[in-house]
Image (cartoon, rainbow, N blue to C red):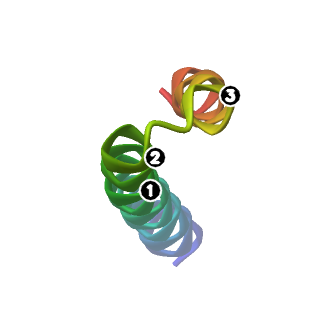
Amino acid sequence: MLRLRRKSQQHAARAHRDTLLKVLERRMESAREKGDNQLLRQLEAEAQYLR
């Protein structure tokens, strides 16, 4: 039971991180299109932290 719960928690954490990275990718693309280099650098740093 404990192993199943731990595995489920790990799966949820991985899915959450993947979702965060996808959102960051979209935000980085938007920052690139707008030419907002400061925001782009911040988002890239955040993405690096999550990876």
Q: Is residue 27 left or right of residue 50?
A: left
Q: Is residue 3 above or below residue 31?
A: below
Circle 2: element type = helix
Q: Who's the residue at 31% across and 47% down the image?
A: 33
Earlier residue among tags 3 and 1:
1
Q: Nearer the viewer, residue 48 or 8?
A: 48
Whole-number angstrom distance, CA of label 3 to CA of label 2: 9 Å
Earlier residue among tags 3 and 2:
2
Q: Residues within 10 Å of mark 2 (few under 14, many from 20)?
A: some
Front: mark 3 or 1:
3
Q: Residues within 10 Å of mark 1 (few under 14, many from 20)?
A: some
Circle 3: element type = helix
Whole-percent x, y for residue 6 in the image: 55, 63
Q: Is residue 24 above or below residue 37?
A: below
Q: Who's the residue at 46% across and 46% down the image?
A: 31
Tell me whether the residue at label 2 lies in contact with that at label 1, contact meaning CB atoms closer than 8 angstroms. yes
Front: mark 2 or 1:
2
Circle 1: element type = helix
Q: Amino acid at mark 3?
A: Gln
Q: Is residue 43 left or right of residue 10?
A: right
Name the residue beneath numbered marker 2.
Answer: 31
Whole-number angstrom distance, CA of label 2 to CA of label 1: 6 Å
Name the residue beneath numbered marker 3.
Answer: 38
Q: Nearer the viewer, residue 10 or 2?
A: 10
Whole-number angstrom distance, CA of label 3 to CA of label 1: 13 Å
Q: Amino acid at mark 1?
A: Arg
Name the residue beneath numbered marker 1.
Answer: 27
Q: Amino acid at mark 2?
A: Ala
Whole-percent x, y for residue 9 in the image: 54, 68
Whole-percent x, y for residue 8 in the image: 44, 72
